[in-house]
Image (spheres, rainbow, N blue to C red):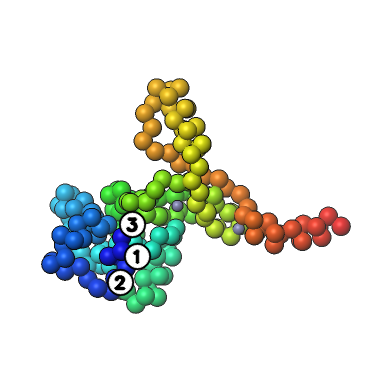
Amino acid sequence: MSNLHAAGHDLDAGSAAVDSDTPVEKFREFLEIRGDKLTEPRRVVVRHIFHSHKHFDADELVRDLHDAGKAVSRSTVYRTLRLLVEAGLLRELRLTNRTAFEHDYGYPQHDHLHCTSCNRIVEFRNEQVKELRDAVSRAHGFRASGHRFLITGICASCSRSHTPRRRLDLI
Ligand SMILES: [Zn+2]
Ligand SMILES: [Zn+2]
């Protein structure tokens, strides 16, 4: 993934072989199969997204691109996000009050905690979740290829900042 950190430098034809495993190339292949093209704005969006691993929603991405001086229309961003999910490069996380996206390609399987107060998303890996998934699947004669496990609630820092108010309420 290190070659993705050269932000602002376009992948030229000469480096195509080196970049064949990058999300940009994977996306190009996906689009070509559909008879579609990796346009320059789409490439800008993909390179921006895969520059760093984080959870983001569509509007955040639109703002980020704008702040970075990259002029990509809102509709292109939304359409590109949908295509990246279809291509298996991004994973969609349906949260209580919003939809977030994160890298799927080349990133290990993990699960999430979502704080409904500050919207923070925390990643965790726990083998027992996978073991439980496999046990449930076996019991149903099901071959699992993936799962979604999302814990919603209040994070540690939100419950700390809310504690004094609750205490006052009790007086
Ligand atoms: Zn929180
Ligand atoms: Zn995640």
List the residue tagged with mark 3: 81
Query: What residue is shown with label 2?
Result: 7
Asked if the residue at tag 3 contacts the one at tag 2, i.e. Cβ–Cβ closer than 8 Å, the answer is no
Q: Is mark 1 on a helix, strand or loop?
A: loop
The amino acid type, in three-letter code, at marker 3 is Leu
Give the residue number, with chain letter if any, for mark 1.
Answer: 51
Callouts 1 and 2 close, C-beta under 8 Å? yes
- Tell me the residue at 77%/57% (across/down): 166
Specify the amino acid type for callout 2.
Ala
* Residue 117 pos. (x, y %): 61, 57
Q: Alpha carbon of mark 2 to alpha carbon of mark 3: how far? A: 19 Å
Q: Is residue 156 left or right of residue 58?
A: right
Crowd band around label 1 with a 10 angstrom C-alpha radius: few (<14), some (14–19), many (20+): some
Labelled disc at residue 93: none
- The residue type indicated by label 1 comes to His
Give left or right: position of 115 versus 73. right
Name the residue furthest bottom: 69
Numbered disc total: 3
Dot 2 falls on a residue whose secondary structure is loop
Instruction: Answer with the quarter of the image where residue 49 lies.
Output: bottom left
